[in-house]
Image (spheres, rainbow, N blue to C red):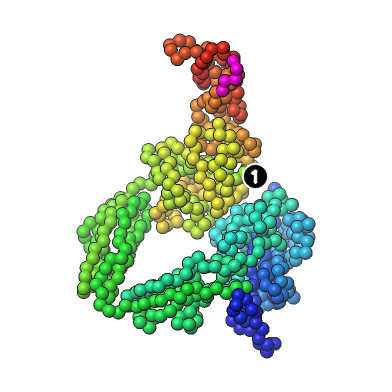
Amino acid sequence: MKSRRRSFLCVFLLCGGVVLPAANLRAQLAITEVMPHAWTNEAGHRFPDFWELTNFGTNEVDLEGYKFTDLNTIINARSDAFHGLVIQPHESIIFSRENLAFYTNESQFREWWGADRLVGVRIVVVPATDPARPNADPFPGLGPANDALQLWDGSNNYVDSVVWANASDGYTFTYSPVTGEFPVTSSEGTCHQASVATATGRDIGSPGRHCDPLPLWFDLEPTNTVADGGTSVTLSSAAYGFPRPRFQWYFNGEKIPHGTNGLLPVANVTPVEAGSYYVVITNGLNVVTSRVAELMVNTSDRPCELISGLSDLTVTTNEQPTFRVVTRGYPLCAYQWYFNGSPLAGQTGSSLQVGPVTFADTGDYSVVASNRFATCTASAKLTVTRKPELYITEIMAWPARPYADWWELTNYDTNAVRLLGYRFVDKGMTFYRAVEITNSLMIAPGESIIFCDGITAEEFRQWWGAEHLPPGLQVFTYEKFGLADTTDALRLWNATTTLEHVFIHDVGYDGGVSNVTFRFQPTFWTEQEESVVGQNGTFCAANGDTIGSPGYTTNPPPRITAIRRVGNDTIIRWRAPAGISCTLEARDTLAQGPWVSVGSFVADCTIMTVTNSAAGRQRFYRLVHGP
């Protein structure tokens, strides 16, 4: 990195016991918040994309000549937004995109989030087109899926960047107050002081406010490695902090020019590559050096040896499973793969990818690894099964606060399915942001399980009313993405597929209704339908004026949920689908004899309560479905 030659003066910042050149000051700048997709109001207007730049250093930074773009190249980056702009120490500046049809000035941004929250915060409205290039295409907005924001200084040196796969409508992205990782969806109550935008009452973000910088620390440091000559190795490190850490690897004390990532690949190692490796992380505020790791390269004769063998795999049709072995040996081991004892032509590497698989690929796979000193063998069984009949049957995308999004998975199969390792994600349909099920959930035939964003199972039961829900309903809590209340999708993968287009089920919806769930039939292409009270198990939640059918796909039979004796009175609580007629009957013995009607009732959205006077010591009750 170069210092500013115009001044012929070299300025240094003392930080963490290490002297840093002034050029490192740009590392103190960080992108702290991004709004990729604000809420669209009833008039069809959407507030603008915006992003926030924060100076965590103690020096002002002249932004003249800085440039930014989305997931594009520096050739298409914009610089006019930074003309004459200087960012002060500890200041955050908002850069919002002009929308000629709806949003054109700073005052509208302040009205959006509340002027009282933005006192002293500078807001720069970036024109939709570049004045220096009036015939060029408008600057692209920040996309809600698979996009990025990149920032360079006036000398085209990289400053910072952030990427995201999927954004929830109306929520900004920011960084984790624990690790500094980006993206984290904004939520109320954190140190970011996120709040609901005044103008919409829907958008969530914290423009002008952010958490403190975070110290740098290594989560993973390089370790001593022994490799046989000719193999390829990767030295690994992982680090966190904010502003985001930058990596620089060293070999025997000398900087490795290309070693600027957490991983350092070293291909086809020879004794020349043997030596000491370490990595230094910096962010303009702190410097931390990893432990020193020794790479040792063996060129002495060594028999071929199996270090890691094969494991049996069970996959569904159309997947592409991979078998892989790890060996040691010098000269390097040669490989040959076999299927049911017959050699596979051309399969002479340390790994074997099979598929897309059919039932005919079920069988025994083995590999023979050898050099002139030894031969070793590994084998495993591949089982190809049909895809389980699991379907996404309901989605709550627009609940009233403080309640949360949720969705329902139902097993239409005849076998129970273990969900450990299954993954799911919303729009974008990539593994990148998928949530993985990490506990051993089992879903029985005919059972429905609820997956809820950010609230506990107990909070979910309080919301809907435990007596309304099926006994033993499983509720799984996750936190990684939210379901948009406009247009979104949801996809479920099993634990083994490596192909994003090979999924168990996916659904999409267009538009949302506040406090009403969407229902889906168990097919791939059926459009969503709004839940209707009394149909398909739909009822009213105990709290929140919400309508849905968590745990149900059809109307359940009427059932008594509780019986309590108070003096000579018996209080019976029961539920049935709204609109259903039921007769409550009683008798004093279970022996043969008539049941006596206590009364006939029509169920509504609530838990029904009936009081029956009885002088005897015991009484039995039943509900009978009326005509």
Instruction: Report the residue that reaches farthest toward the top.
Output: 593
> Does residue 157 belong to the magenta stretch?
no
Residue pictured at 58% horizontal, 66% vertical: 241
| Amino acid carrying mark 1 in the image | Pro
Q: As displayed, is residue 338 above or below residue 560?
A: below
Residue drawn at point x = 49 percent, y = 75 percent: 279
Using the image as rendered, state which of residue 132 and residue 330 is in the foreground: 330
In the displayed structure, would residue 200 be above or below residue 516?
below
Q: Quadrant of the N terminus?
A: bottom right
Q: Is residue 107 above or below residue 547?
A: below
Residue 538, visible in the rendered structure: no
Name the residue nearer the viewer: 275 or 394.
275
Q: Quadrant of residue 414?
A: top left
Name the residue rendered at 58%, 34% in the picture: 465
Classify residue 82 as left or right of residue 542.
Answer: right
The image quadrant of residue 514 is top right
- Name the residue nearer the viewer: 570 or 200: 570
Relative to 333, 487 lies left or right: right
Residue under label 1, please give it. 402
Q: Residues within 10 Å of mark 1 (few under 14, many from 20)?
A: few
Q: Residue at x 60, y 53 (%)?
A: 168
Residue 120 in sight: yes
Name the magenta segment's main secondary structure: strand
Asked which secondary structure carries label 1, the reply is: loop
Residue 286 location (% of width, % of height):
60, 73
The magenta span reads 564-568
Quadrant in the rendering for residue 611: top right
Q: Position of residue 541 (x, y in %)?
A: 60, 35
Horizontal side, residue 585 vs residue 156: left or right: left
Residue 142 x/y as whole percent? 62, 62
